[in-house]
Amino acid sequence: MIRRVLAVTVKELLQLKRDWRTLVALLGMPVVLLMIYGFALSFDVQDIRLAVVDRSRSADSRELIRSFLRSGYFVQVASLDDTRPLDGLFDSGRAQAALVIDADFAADITARRPTSIQFLLDGSDSQTANTILGYARQIVVATAPDLLEIEFDPPVSAAPVVWYNPNLTSSIFLVPGLVAFILMITSVIATALAVVREKERGTMESLRATPLVAIELLVGKTLPYLLVGSVAAAGSLTLAWLLFDVPIRGSIAWLAVLTVLFLAGGLGWGVLISTIADTQQVAFQMGLLSSMLPTLLLSGFVFPISSMPEALQVISHIVPARYFIAALREVVLKGVGPEVWWNDALALVIFGAVVLLLATARTVRSL
């Protein structure tokens, strides 16, 4: 049995060697997609165009303005005496936010009276507006004690501490999910096309004449792509560390185990599709739709599963990327062991076993 499996594996590796374009695509596509999506997909907002209306014209108001500019998020585009020009700035898109400081700002601080500032936002993009509002609140909270020189008796202080991602950088959260997204698409499509190619070229008839049984054919077909996928996963995680400062705090060995389990499920799903589709075009479309959309929308990659309707939360349980992304973030970002993510690994095993059994059953019928 092992000799027959190795024979099919060697045959598939030779096929990949001859079809070097496919090999380059399988290894290069994850790297290219990671770079494109890694830089483009981000919840961070930079260079926010800020208009300032400073009626106070005091040292305290200037310190508050400098705090906004020192944060690295805001760029001052206008300095105004009143709020009337703000409508034109917002309408034309030249300003995304405006900081309005009243004339009594410095006097209120000196007298230790309650004071306030006004922060105006362009809310046409609600996601961006919420992010900008969070930045503004953070800056004001950090600056207020310096302006007011608050002293407590007895001394009391409160300082928030963020674990695992101190700067709340969105790429550190998104890139592990992006790795799962890329691996799922490439593993499903690669195996689906590999088996359907045999049908189109007529070589499946030759395989039927050999002593191969279904499981030997499946294992021999998927092993090369498991190897290629593992290399692509290692390259993607290395690139994520080099380009996006994504830490890898956990065990590399456990990371490899999780990746193999996830790839096995993806490869099995690709083989199952190949038993249904008769042409590479149909296999490609089925593989792309069944891997890309669920992984993007229902895995927790971008949108939290807890905020989805209950029906979609139930459906998300059959999406393998849901479990891989959760476990990957636990290992990569938190450095925890299997005592935390064992249930996600078990779900990957169950998914892989089910799709491989279904693929084997359908392959037995075709052979």
Image: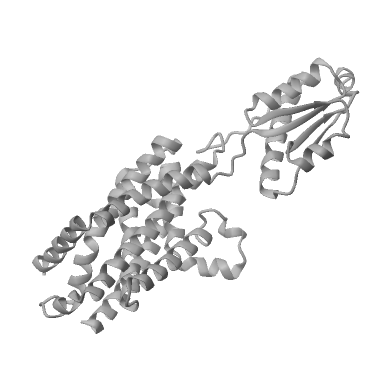
User: Among all residues in the image, which is located at the extreme bottom?
Assistant: 365
What residue do we see at 62% from left, 28% from top? 72
Q: Quadrant of the N terminus?
A: bottom left
Quadrant housing residue 74: top right
The answer to which of 361 and 254 lies nearer the viewer is 361
What residue do we see at 39% from left, 56% from top? 342
**In this picture, residue 133 sits left or right of residue 346:** right
Q: Is residue 51 above or below residue 153?
A: below
**In this picture, residue 364 sits left or right of residue 174:** left
Residue 246 coordinates in the image, percent (x, y): 44, 39
The answer to which of 53 and 6 lies nearer the viewer is 53
Residue 97 coordinates in the image, percent (x, y): 75, 37
- How many numbered marks appear? 0
The answer to which of 342 and 244 lies nearer the viewer is 244
**In this picture, residue 107 sits left or right of residue 367:** right
**In this picture, residue 142 sits left or right of residue 91:** left
Residue 202 coordinates in the image, percent (x, y): 20, 77
Quadrant housing residue 113: top right
Q: Quadrant of the C terminus?
A: bottom left
Can I make out residue 154 in this image? no
The answer to which of 273 and 332 lies nearer the viewer is 273
Residue 89 coordinates in the image, percent (x, y): 79, 37
Can I make out residue 139 in this image? yes
What residue do we see at 60% from left, 68% from top? 310
What residue do we see at 17% from left, 79% from top? 205
Quadrant housing residue 15: bottom left
Q: Is residue 86 above or below residue 178?
A: above
